[in-house]
Image: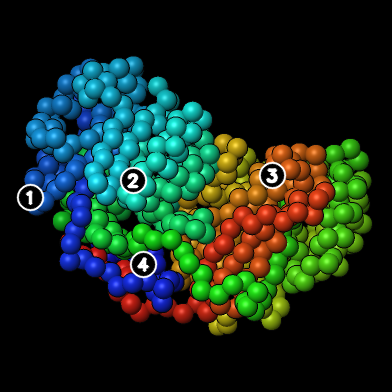
Amino acid sequence: MKEELYPHYARYKHKLKSVDHSVRKKRIILISDTHITRGGAFNPLMFERTIKAINEIKNVDYIIHLGDLTHNGTYLDYEYATGCLKELMKNNKFFIIPGNHDAKNVGYLLFEEIFGSRTFEIEEEDIYILGLDSSIPDMDEGRIGIRTNESVRNIFLSKQNKLKILCFHHPVIPIPLTGRERSTIIDAGDTLEMILKSRVDIVLNGHRHISNIYSCSDGEREVVIFNSGTTSSNKTRYRELFTFTVLNIYKNSLTFRTKMIMDDEDIKRGRYINRTFHYSKPRKERELFVRIVHISNTHFSIHNFMEEIYQEAVRQINEIDAAIVIHSGDVTDSNKLPEFEIAASKLSHIKHPRLIIPGNNDLQTFGWDLFQNWIGPLDPYYEDEAIRVVGINSVDRAIQNGNIGRRKMKETINMIKNKRDSKINVITFYNNIIPHPKTRFDYMLSDSGAVLKNFTLPDNKINFILTGHDHIAFSLQVEDTVISSCGTLCSGDYLDLNGNSYSIISCYKDGHVEIERVYVRSNRKEMTGKYWININKEKNNGNNGTDVT
């Protein structure tokens, strides 16, 4: 298999200290989704090869199984599995959490009887690892829960000056090459918020039978989210077959090496620098490059539209030095002709250039024709000397959660990559691709895994992805791309106790980005994220993607 490199921190090379691999602090073996059973789901040969390969690795501190030990969760499966695991369980290095298959057929009780607990803790002077049970008995999807999220947040915040690792079976953000399955933690947005606020450094998941890695940032610290592949299940994804991963933790970096059991090859997975961001210049000394006003969920209608709030929002927006106002969908409340008439009239009060995409409320019944007649193209485009904005209609009447599609995704990426300039590249569509607090994960874009992976690859030069839909202002940087959604501009359907809001995105010439949420009624601004993007799209030629064993 061709070697893949993930240089997470290439964009920060000028701010990093040299990486020191002279002293390795910890070596952790990650296995997942063994699906042990007496049947076709389990590949015993690949499991035996995995055990042999692990036993040949020196200086292993811990072996962590990320769930789905068994396939059916039955007594016979657990009995067979413990026999298979005896080589790994003979010392105190082995730790395990249950997956959704382990919780089938009341299997969670058998898991407790055999392993003592469905959670685990590892704590040393400089590292803390917590394993959680995200399974729901007899269901494929998972859940962490409000109470657990709150208690885990407090636990991690109490672990000062330690590298903090959180393990649970189900992914917290979409994984590519996994189809349209929605079997993830349903409270992924709340869990992601907890991870960021509790300053977790590494998140380890399984479940999707393919390995993947993201570097994410809330603007202050970064967290690496790694998804482990399947070790011995015959349900494999695409061309990745049976794998386990070696995680090496050094003084100020870490490496992932995913080992392909069948082919005896590796996928090298970059390195991570554990540090806090420090920006060198105060805001007043920065030179603005471009500013965007981001709005969504106007819901123009006779009943749900708040006229007074909208007029105040327009007054504020017109006073902002902005290049463009981007509206990320749900222009109308129920796509009726009078609502489109209201929308066309009211939106004309905004003096800045506007790019408007439809939401699912806009495109029911006759909305496909009405939107184009009264508002504009379903896939609009805008470009000036500083910014390029590609609007994509992600609404599909045949797919409840929306869809970008492989063809549109490829066309968009190729179009942006072929532009030989240093303009800010923005993509906007209605449905969300990262989980948001206070919402369910399964409301997201149906092909969110593929879209997230492809749109955030550094070589694709996409700086921002702006979405709407959830009525929540939330932002996160994934690799080199800042993903941001905004709140509710002038509808009564807001989910923020402070009321209606919109976002201001300011990008400076040094690559610094600030995202502010503005509450319409009070005109109060609240910083929701500070990020850094590679504004010049220059490739980094350093060795940040190199792996060291």
Disc assigned to residue 56: 1
Q: Secondary structure at mark 1?
A: loop
With 197 as the anchor, is 358 left or right in this view?
right
**What is the CA distance from the residue labelled 1 to the residue labelled 2?**
25 Å
Identify which amino acid the numbered label 2 is placed on: Ile
Question: Label 2: few (<14), some or many (≥20) within 10 Å?
Answer: many
Q: Nearer the viewer, mark 3 or mark 2?
A: 2
Residue situated in front as seen by the camera: 226 or 429? 226
Q: Secondary structure at mark 4?
A: loop
**What is the CA distance from the residue labelled 1 to the residue labelled 3?**
52 Å
Disc assigned to residue 383: none
Residue identifier under label 4: 7
**What is the CA distance from the residue labelled 1 to the residue labelled 4?**
28 Å
Disc assigned to residue 165: 2
Quadrant position of residue 47: top left
Identify which amino acid the numbered label 3 is placed on: His
Asked whether the beta carbons under mark 1 and mark 3 sit within 8 Å of each other, the answer is no
Residue identifier under label 3: 471
Which is nearer the N-term, disc 3 or disc 2?
2
With 5 as the anchor, is 60 left or right in this view?
left
With 23 as the anchor, is 99 left or right in this view?
right
